[in-house]
Amino acid sequence: MREPAASQRGTARFFGAATLLVTVFLLGGRDAHGAGGWLIPPQQAPERYGNLLINRTSEAHGQKPAAFSHWLHRAKYTCRVCHFELYFAMQTNSTEITEEKNRNGEYCGACHNGKIAFGHTEENCAKCHSGEIATGSKEFGRLAFYPENPFGNGVDWMAALDMGKIKPVQTILGEFQPVKYNKEIVLEAEWERIPPAVFSHEAHNRWLDCSICHPDIFNIKKKTTLHFEMQYILEGKFCGACHLSVAFPLDDCRRCHPKMGQP
Amino acid sequence: MMRRIVMVLVAVLALHSPCFAQTFGVKKRTPRPEEFGNVLMNNFAESSRTPIAPVVFKHWVHRTKYTCRLCHVDIGFSMNANGTQVHEADNEGGMYCGTCHNGKEAFGPRGKDEAGKAVENCSRCHSSGKAVEFKYVFAKTIEGYPKSRFGNRVDWMAAEEKGLFKLKDQLEGLSIKRKDLKIPVDESIKSKEIGMPEIIFSHAKHSVWNGCELCHPDLFGVEKGKTKYTMQDIFDGKFCGACHGSVAFSNLDCQLCHLKDVQ
């Protein structure tokens, strides 16, 4: 057999090393996200869940960051009012809020104008610009009257809505009729022994608008949403856009995978 | 050979790496009302031998004066941003922007200020990244116009119907005035998705701005039921999505088209 030319030998050696590298990399990747490797964020105190500090420009302008509590607002307004009608982004500090825009009736100022809710006047600055993420914790006690849930705010918001304990407003822009689309979707899990997730459009429609999720977060064509996997949900993508930080957290496995743990 | 292997390796690693995973499963930024429909034109501006700032084209200024049809049919503007490949020489020769921006119909590249002094108007269009004092300011232009929820937050159709502006559909020396065709009746389009409200499509409303020829036969065939498309196609900028989503009312607003409840 003829000896291969030096350049060919070099290529073969390089190719071998490269294959090994790729294999290790791929296996490593699987391992990091694989079985037993889910990193569900630790539970927070119920009165902190869904709270955030908005500090896009506050401190740069010599003001303390604004504290925002989802639990305070969601009892009065549905998600769609702020995240759809008022242009609030779904990631902290990515909404282009300025004090001037608020005072002109945009963003927070759409309600915080002294008419619907307390306004942007001097005596009220510290109500939001407290720099303290637990602002409002004193009022949290009133949530004790809502149906319980072991996770998140300790409140089953969906049941509270069903029971009429809360009556969140669905629009602040006039008339609104939700789209009557109630299809339930059964999402088969990719892993063996993991029961399917059951998704209810009806439950989501009561808080959201179609376009909060479609088409950015989820494609609407069946089975075309790429990378829709638990590992990415845990990174805040897909369901994780809400169900990590505001809506019931991912600790509550059975609420999506109802047959989890059953034989 | 080596180069090919390296390229394949880079592709495999890039596909697997988490940094590739940044752009899916999350909500995109919603453009602000004054940005909606603005197009950055930069085919040649920055890459030319005499670089200049890209053009910021504002649909909201132009649509208070001219129909969509005039520019996108008679003048020949593409429906894709940067699809027209406009050169400065085209404009100087009276094509594309230069059809109107010639100092007669609208300001030309060179003009005179109020005092009669010669001025260059370059930066009135080539404005990207510059602080330009524009003749038309968004908030002022839309003052008193009927409001809508999304896009420019203006109900352009209602504004036109109310006569708040008069649209020019023909240009002397360019357009050929022919007798109007009879406008077909409204269409009710069934959704393939069970439970999704039907779409009511109005030829009458569309033809005010578009005539027939902006949509037919390129975007939509003319034989009933022959053009097959899905909502995902529309979200991807095809069919209705050629305008709705980027210029005409945003396709966030499901119920503007999906009007008729089904049982």
Image (cartoon, rainbow, N blue to C red):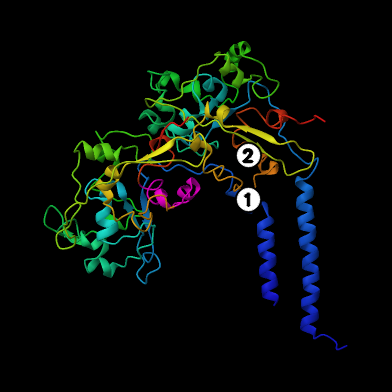
The quarter holding residue A87 reads: top left
Residue at disc 2, secondary structure: loop
Q: Is residue B223 magenta?
A: no
Task: Residue A180 in the image: state x and y as whole percent.
Answer: 49, 29
The quarter holding residue B221 reads: bottom left
What is the residue that sits farthest to the right in this orientation? A1
* Amino acid type at mark 1: Ala
Horizontal side of residue A82 vs A259, given as left or right: left
Horizontal side of residue B217 vs A51, given as left or right: left
Task: Residue B79 in the image: state x and y as whole percent.
Answer: 36, 57
Relative to the observer, which residue lies in front, B130 or A211?
A211
The quarter holding residue B20 reads: bottom right
Task: Residue B133 in the image: state x and y as whole percent.
Answer: 27, 48
Q: Identify the chain of the residue marked 2, using the numbered disc in the image.
A: A
- Can residue A56 be seen here? The reply is no
Please provide the residue range marked out in magenta: B228-247
Relative to the observer, which residue lies in front, B176 or A80?
B176
Mark 1 packing: few (<14 Cα in 10 Å), some, or many (20+)? some
Q: Which residue is mark 2?
A: A236
Task: Residue A15 in the image: state x and y as whole percent.
Answer: 77, 71
- Can residue A52 be seen here? The reply is yes
Spatial CA span between label 1 and label 2:
12 Å
Q: Identify the chain of the residue marked 1, using the numbered disc in the image.
A: B
The quadrant of the rendering that contains the N terminus of chain B is bottom right
The tag on residue B21 is 1
